[in-house]
Image (cartoon, rainbow, N blue to C red):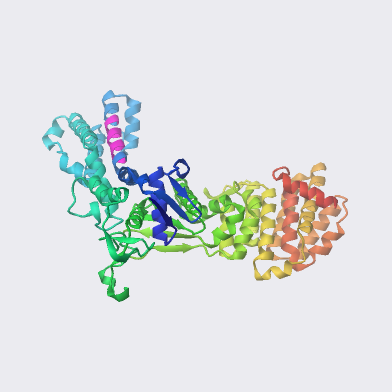
Amino acid sequence: MKERVYLSDWLYNAGIIGFLKIVTNDDIDSENSIEIGENYIEFDRSALQGFSSKYFSFAFNQYGRYYNILNTLEEFLSDLDKLEQGDSNVIHNLRKKYKISDKDKDEEILQVILDRFKKILNGFKFLKENIKLPSKEEIKEDPKKAIKGLLEFAIKVMKDEYQEIFESDVQIYLRGMYGQKSFLNLTINKERLKKFYEDFEEPIVSGKIDHEKELFCVNCGRQAKKGAKFDTGISPFFGLNDDAINYAWNFDTSLPLCEICELIYFSSFAGLTPSPRNDKTFYFVNEDSSVRNLYRANKLLNDVLKKDNNENFLVDFFTELVLELEREKAEFVLKNIALIELNLSEENFPKVYSFNVSREKARFIKENQTDLKTLARASYKVNDQGSYILTDTIEKILKNTLDYGYLYWLERISLSEQGKSNLYQIFFGYETLQTLSILIFRFLKNITKEGRKLMSLEEKEIWRMYAYGKELADVMKSRNAENKIPSIAYKLLNALKIGDVNVFMDVAMRTFMAYDMEVPSSMAKVLYNKEYFYPLGYSFLNGFLSKGGNNKGNVQETKEVANG
């Protein structure tokens, strides 16, 4: 019997993604027993054979405590073996690792290991109940032997009692997310996997389920499973409970569920992405364009969090998402995406971060993907604090603050770095800044209210200005005057900062004439239009400072425009 499950609320969507990850081992293209439609998944009930073991394994690995602790204990044991070998260099490294002074005795390392082991025991009830610490007399008599024996015994217990720890850890982990349904009930302290199988997998696969006669699933409309309801047992942060009875229809907080939706909701933990900064915080990206897009967005969030543990991960994630979206779907997806932050240590409702991307901004990002991608590797450091130009640009687009002030900042630190400032490091060229200048021009022209002032300015005029600046610099280099370029560039940049067209034109014309070059008439004509000063002035400056060759497409276009 086939069952179809459609996208719905964000928690149910997390359940769908979690269900897919559990069944396919987080590889949806490898499993052909589940059909993935545009906004639904479909599977035969028989495909859920073995689901219980997969469910427990996924939760166990996501919790990750067992292997982390086992690896730590084995590392302690290895360090004790190194200590026994007596190699001075090895011992020096151990002292450094455990933050022990070279003046202290070797026993101090043993004490640190013992203290850390006790700390592990305090957070691991099963291990604490099955381990007996050596007495003070035993430690005093032979500390290395006593602590080594302790570690060996603890490792043996963990390996011998793997199945018990496996089931217990899953119960501990999921109690923090759900209530006390099924194997999570406080009275259940053994055979937890069997309990899950009996309550979820077996009834679905066998089809032997007691249904309510007149009640139907609040989520999908199937006949409700007897005793199954959406409540705090499924979601303490999303469901109804007796305290909220006044808000429930007919004063009834029992919302009936079918066995399929109950299982989907119970799989939501696997669809959430744990925060690397806080083991009580989880994230989920919600969007309703398609199941595959939903799966891909959450997989991308997981990858971003793993590689970049900083406060700006939301912008980093969004930037990556923008660049990965298929062009034809980008606008729709960007308008309908939200990120949910769930903190299990707080009683508040989950936080929802909506990117609030308007139709115009979504279209702008989609249509400028190619140029945005050229910014992907451009970065800079200020006091060793790194930033990416692409991330900055996306953030400013979202906040509606992208303008020439940001370009001025990048031009300034670039010139300062060339002057060998110890404060800045840059990893981009002026060809990249010219691409950014074009993006800023397009953004201001098409998105902001001030854009109407730029409507008659065409990009070919901007590129022509870039060509003029490059031509002037090439002549100066041919006459061995390259060392004068930075000082002239500073004057041009300062004029741009304060919006002084006269000073900018005076510096530019004097430089042209100093090298027997004719001042382009079109340059004076367009620059004296105050509204055009920034896009044209920055383009001239970028051409003047460019080394050439880093952005072949733009350089080629510059030549064509200059010749036209």
Provide the residue span drawn in magenta. 68-78
Is residue 530 left or right of 134 when viewed as pictured?
A: right
**Was residue 300 drawn as part of the magenta stretch in this picture?**
no
Q: Is residue 536 visible?
A: yes
Q: How many marks?
A: 0
Return the residue nearer the eye: 93 or 67.
67
Q: Residue at x 57, y 56 (%)?
A: 392
Return the residue nearer the eye: 540 or 186.
186
Q: Residue at x 29, y 48 (%)?
A: 206
In the rendered image, residue 431, in percent from the top left (x then y), is placed at 70, 48
| Magenta stretch: dominant secondary structure | helix
Q: Above or below — where is 95 with respect to 456?
A: above
Return the residue nearer the eye: 132 or 195.
195
Q: Above or below — where is 411 with respect to 95?
A: below
Is residue 277 left or right of 546 when viewed as pictured?
A: left
**Was residue 70 drawn as part of the magenta stretch in this picture?**
yes
Q: Residue at x 28, y 64 (%)?
A: 213
In the rendered image, residue 282, in percent from the top left (x then y), is placed at 38, 55
Q: Above or below — where is 36 with respect to 106?
A: below
In the rendered image, residue 513, in percent from the top left (x then y), is placed at 86, 54
Is residue 177 left or right of 188 when viewed as pictured?
A: right
In the rendered image, residue 141, in percent from the top left (x then y), is placed at 13, 30
Q: Is residue 103 visible?
A: no
Is residue 101 left or right of 367 when viewed as pictured?
A: left
Q: Above or below — where is 349 with respect to 433?
A: below
